[in-house]
């Protein structure tokens, strides 16, 4: 019995450690009295605002001075879900994306964490952007799947906006999709499955040494007709789930609820 | 008693997390009905093939079009063992190494994961290459040693071929060896021990900020007379095991069975 | 009860895994018969010396030949604490800093490990430098705070010397401070708090994609009047502790004992 207990615990811990499996809690807007605090979300995500960035810091951060107020969306685990969430925030608010940086993180997993900065002249605009982004993350984590061996991520939007353009070079206004897997080897096969399953236009291919922050992922991005992009993502997901399952017997679960 | 149990569990988990200690299973060629799947091996390693890479993907991956078929060897934990295994695969089959990329991974450890792509005109050639590589990994993991504090790795071959040439600049046809340790500090002292113990020709020195993917390793590679290279590796291993032991009381074990 | 036990264990493991929380042991100068071994410290830190670096290794490491002896300070977890400790070692001994490299490590956390090399003509000088640095690490880990969600780090010195100059461009002889947080988002807000709380001169701003090794941190460094630098660090610490607490209910503790 003790051994069973040990196994059970180890499996739980490994699950907590791995890639996408950051099942902490949905977006929460409570927890701190500071005016800079907006809220938290899955993946050790935090949303913050600075109404009036200190002049000296503004300069050394190399941000255009016209953005007096900045919004900050950061996470230990996840980058794709946050960039797609930020894209919705940009569509819904009067703010702009100033920078998107990908840390090599995921708390022991093979992927990225992120740091996304929004700018506006008015703090209410960036606060609203951060709120929208935090709320979207539960959805955009829906097609992130984790196991002790790695993770899979799929994203899809009917209409890309400026966050996806900045991060991935997505054509603004067109449908845009993403497939991603760790270990990276799986990412190539699902990219191939995506490309073969529908008429899409490849936009980017990122691998451990090129286009990622040395993460153990292959990320394939593509644009096209909305139906085709969606079909490509779905075809890739089906293959990815089968391949990731060969590396570990644990059941592969969505981080929240699949949306594609 | 409960505290002992807690300690035992923590130690087991830490062991599972750390560097080289990826004791999951030897090479396995079962587990998935997809034709792309070849097999799995230690270190969350997966071997895959694509018989006919999609044209658009081919282009964006920047692979020479003459390689219609590619083989993919990828792992969460391990790069040296996979490159030495790939070298045997290149010797044994009619395929070529197209790229070797090192992710900053090892699932919480201080080292690398990898993504190695083989190419051939015929899928049977790359499939055979991946099979050979997967089978070799049990051996090439033999001188990978892990503890909760870090890991050590030693490799040796009597005759380097094109995978070692591509990854490390090894002179083709000559004996070639590698010493590696995490934390990186230990890697310098064992490199010094290797260089002093025999007449070898240094080929490369990689450290966290130069030549690695920001891994916490120093990797020293060298060529020379077969006996000298082997002697240098053995001298380094003796020192490395003593130094790594100072950081954690856990017994330091080979991942499989030492081969040098 | 079993569930409680599971939770307790997971929390302990997560704590052990995360960022700054490398509570293994204070500096220890015992443990190994090798003359190269000096001692160990918190964060899986090891201190080593080589009295007479092998000629071939010297060359490939690209170190000035006049430094026959090198001292090596390396860690899996921590870079700031080690650089500030090395700065004290430089002040106290007749040795020089040859290189400072930051690995993307912290054993599953969001920060750095490090590899610092000291040089001297005489081995007793670098040995003394490593001894001083190892002894300082207990203090410099004092304002490193960890939780399962991330970590915070604060450093302060009344007078910066050559290690801080090499690593951060600190003006030699002036007071110098550092604020750092993971996830990186928190690091921006505490940098802003520091900049607003006192008259300081910003020296550097590092983020996941620029100036770090893709770590999930924002690091802000500044010089100035000793009282102002200290006040800025204290103001940042107060904000940082509140923000990090929103991501995880675990109590946030100093790794050793706060010194600022």
Image (cartoon, coloured by chain):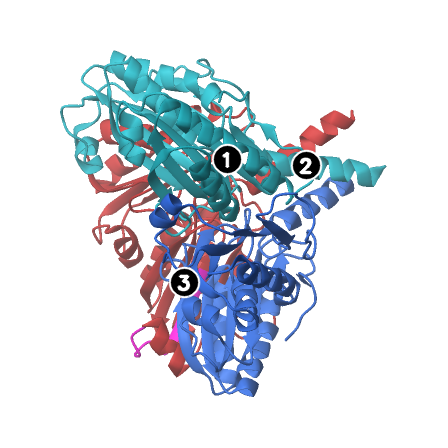
Chain colours: A cyan, B blue, C red
Between label 3 and label 1, give the one nearer the viewer. Answer: 1
Element type at mark 1:
helix
* In the rendered image, residues at marks 3 and 1 fall on the same chain: no
- Residue A46 sits inside the magenta stretch: no
Q: Where is residue A242 in the image (x, y as percent from the top left)?
A: 61, 38
**C-alpha separation, residue under disc 2 versus residue under disc 1:** 20 Å
Residue B130 vs residue C137: left or right? right
**C-alpha separation, residue under disc 2 versus residue under disc 3:** 36 Å
Q: Quadrant of residue A94?
A: top left
Q: Position of residue C193 (x, y in %)?
A: 29, 27
| Label located before the other in sequence (2 or 1) | 1
Task: Decide which of C139, B75 is in the foreground and name it.
Answer: B75
Few, some or many residues within 10 Å of mark 1 (<14, 14–19, 20+): many
Residue A67 vs residue B231: left or right? left
Task: Decide which of C142, B135 is in the foreground and name it.
Answer: B135
Which residue, given by chain and number where applicable, does mark 1 sit on? A236
Q: What stretch is highlighted in magenta?
A: C63-73
Label ID, residue A250: 2
Residue for point 62% across, 35% down: A15
Q: Mark 1 lies on which chain?
A: A
Which residue, given by chain and number where applicable, does mark 3 sit on? B207
Q: Where is residue B32 in the image (x, y as percent from the top left)?
A: 66, 43
> Is there CB contact under 8 Å for labels 2 and 1?
no
| Residue at the right extreme of this rendering | A1
Residue for point 51% across, 66% down: B180
* In the rendered image, residues at marks 2 and 3 fall on the same chain: no
Task: Decide which of C81, C258 is in the foreground and name it.
Answer: C81
Residue for point 55% across, 47% down: B107
Between label 2 and label 3, give the one nearer the viewer. Answer: 2
Q: Mark 3 lies on which chain?
A: B
Q: Position of residue A74 (x, y in %)?
A: 38, 29
């Amino acid at each position: 019995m003790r051994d069973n207990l040990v196994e059970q615990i180890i499996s739980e811990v490994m699950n907590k450690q791995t890639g996408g499996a950051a099942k902490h809690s949905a977006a929460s807007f409570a927890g701190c009295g500071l005016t800079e605090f907006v809220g938290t979300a899955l993946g050790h995500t935090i949303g913050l605002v600075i109404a009036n960035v200190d002049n000296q810091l503004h300069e050394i951060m190399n941000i255009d001075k016209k953005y007096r107020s900045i919004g900050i969306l950061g996470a230990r685990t996840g980058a794709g879900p946050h960039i797609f969430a930020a894209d919705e925030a940009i569509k819904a608010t009067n703010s702009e994306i100033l920078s998107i940086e990908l840390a090599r993180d995921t708390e022991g997993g093979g992927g990225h964490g992120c740091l996304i900065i929004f700018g506006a002249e008015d703090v209410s605009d960036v606060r609203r952007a951060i709120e929208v982004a935090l709320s979207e993350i539960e959805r955009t984590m829906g097609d992130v799947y984790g196991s002790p061996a790695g993770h899979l991520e799929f994203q899809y939007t009917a209409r890309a906006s400026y966050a996806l353009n900045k991060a991935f070079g997505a054509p603004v206004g067109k449908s845009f999709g993403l497939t991603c897997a760790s270990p990276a080897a799986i990412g190539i096969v699902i990219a191939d499955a995506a490309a073969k399953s529908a008429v899409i236009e490849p936009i980017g291919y990122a691998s451990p040494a090129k286009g990622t922050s040395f993460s153990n992922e292959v990320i394939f991005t593509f644009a096209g007709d909305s139906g085709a992009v969606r079909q490509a993502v779905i075809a890739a997901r089906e293959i990815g789930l089968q391949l990731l399952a060969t590396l570990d017997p644990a059941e592969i679960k969505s981080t929240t609820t699949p949306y594609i």
